Image (spheres, rainbow, N blue to C red):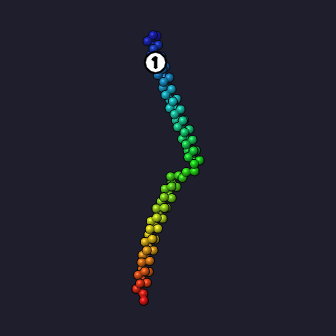
Amino acid sequence: MNDRGPNRMLDEFARMMTDAAGAAQGVRREMETVFRSQGERFINSMDLVQREEFEAVREMATRARVENEALKKRVADLEARLSGASTTAP
């Protein structure tokens, strides 16, 4: 019985430590969930733009800029033709 006593006590201690570690992990997961939920609620209250919406607007702006440059070139070409036509006309 003496040999069994210390081993039994160590087994109980090891089981208690394992249970405590499992409980700590559960608390950690619960806290992460709470913090994530609070963070999302805070960000939503700030009326921020979602990434997908930002990317869509940025793409539209890029296309508009390219189109604007093409139109500026076309206007400049047309003005050059008009200037050339008016200087050669009698």
| Relative depth, front residue between 11 and 29 | 29
Q: Relative to residue 46, is residue 21 depicted above or below?
A: above
Q: Which amino acid does label 1 sit on?
A: Leu
Which residue is drawn at the image coordinates 49% and 28% (left, top)?
A: 21
Q: Relative to residue 90, is residue 77 depicted above or below?
A: above
Q: Relative to residue 26, is residue 78 depicted above or below?
A: below
Q: How many labels does the image show?
A: 1
Which residue is drawn at the image coordinates 46% and 22% (left, top)?
A: 14
Which residue is drawn at the image coordinates 47% and 13% (left, top)?
A: 5
- From the viewer's perspective, is 37 left or right of 71? right
Extreme residue in the top direction: 2
Q: Which percent across, then down, holds residue 71?
A: 46, 71
Q: How crowded is mark 1: few (under 14 residues within 10 Å), some or many (20 or more)?
A: few
Which quadrant of the figure has residue 80?
bottom left
Q: Which percent across, then down, holds residue 49?
A: 54, 52
| Relative depth, front residue between 36 and 64 | 64
Element at badge 1?
helix
Q: Mark 1 points at which residue?
A: 10
Which quadrant of the figure has residue 42?
top right
Q: Which percent across, then down, holds residue 10?
A: 46, 18
Q: Which percent across, then down, holds residue 87?
A: 41, 84
Extreme residue in the bottom direction: 90
| Relative depth, front residue between 10 and 39 | 39
Q: Quadrant of the C terminus?
A: bottom left
